[in-house]
Image (cartoon, rainbow, N blue to C red):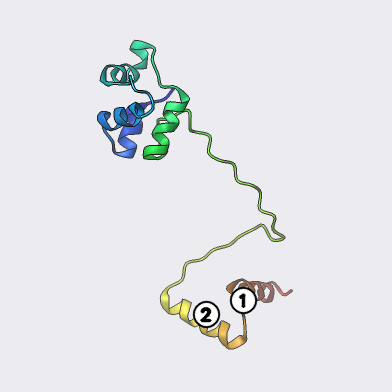
């Protein structure tokens, strides 16, 4: 079940902000309704999924909203090499690597790193 207090805390808004955002579409939404929505165990009232999506569109998604938990599914990448490695370098080391790449004629970091890994693996 949605927890609007948790959501408001997560996105840094108050009840008045929530009311204004929902009232833009649902004209009769006000403080009394908001109080009931914030206490669903006592009143049996909660927002429609469309109203929750309005909040997420206006303030961003955060924990506390049930209707927008489904995050968009990304399409599978159609790559011949689907696995990725990454590393963080100091500025000095990065400049040394760039100099080596330029000296040895590598056009991309990808080409350079593939060659280094292949050499290391003996292939």
Residue 89 placement, left or right of 120: left
Q: Where is 9 relative to 34, above or below?
A: below
Which quadrant is the N terminus positioned in? top left
How crowded pointer 1 is (Cα within 10 Å; few <14, some 14-19, many 20+) is rated as some
Residue at numbered disc 2: 97
Q: Where is 55 relative to 44, above or below?
A: below
Q: Quadrant of residue 2?
A: top left
Residue occupying image coordinates x 40% and y 40%: 60
Kind of element beneath mark 2 = helix
Q: Quadrant of residue 78?
A: bottom right
The image shows residue 62 at horizontal and vertical percentages of 40, 37
Residue 42 placement, left or right of 75: left
Mark 2 vs mark 1, CA separation in Å: 9 Å
Kind of element beneath mark 1 = helix
Instruction: Count the labels in the image.
Output: 2
Residue 75 at least partly seen: yes
How crowded pointer 2 is (Cα within 10 Å; few <14, some 14-19, many 20+) is rated as some
Pointers 2 and 1 in contact (CB under 8 A)?
A: yes
The image shows residue 43 at horizontal and vertical percentages of 35, 11
Residue at numbered disc 1: 112
Residue occupying image coordinates x 62% and y 76%: 112
Which quadrant is the C terminus positioned in? bottom right
> Mark 1 or mark 2, which is nearer the start of the sequence?
2
Q: Where is 94 relative to 50, above or below?
A: below
Query: Of residues 25 and 66, which is closer to you in this image?
Result: 25
Query: Of residues 22 and 88, which is closer to you in this image?
Result: 22
Residue 121 placement, left or right of 72: right
Label ID, residue 6: none
Query: Of residues 84 and 30, which is closer to you in this image?
Result: 30
């Amino acid at each position: 079940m949605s927890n609007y207090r948790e959501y408001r805390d997560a996105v840094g808004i108050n009840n008045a902000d929530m009311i204004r955002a929902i009232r833009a579409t649902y004209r009769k939404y006000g403080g009394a309704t908001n109080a009931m929505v914030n206490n669903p165990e006592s009143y049996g009232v909660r927002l429609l999924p469309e109203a929750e999506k309005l909040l997420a569109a206006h303030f961003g998604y955060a924990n506390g909203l049930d209707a927008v938990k489904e995050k968009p599914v990304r399409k599978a990448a159609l790559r011949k090499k689907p696995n990725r490695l990454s590393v963080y370098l100091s500025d000095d080391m990065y400049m040394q690597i760039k100099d080596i790449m330029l000296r040895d004629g590598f056009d991309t970091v990808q080409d350079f790193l593939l060659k280094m890994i292949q050499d290391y693996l003996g292939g």
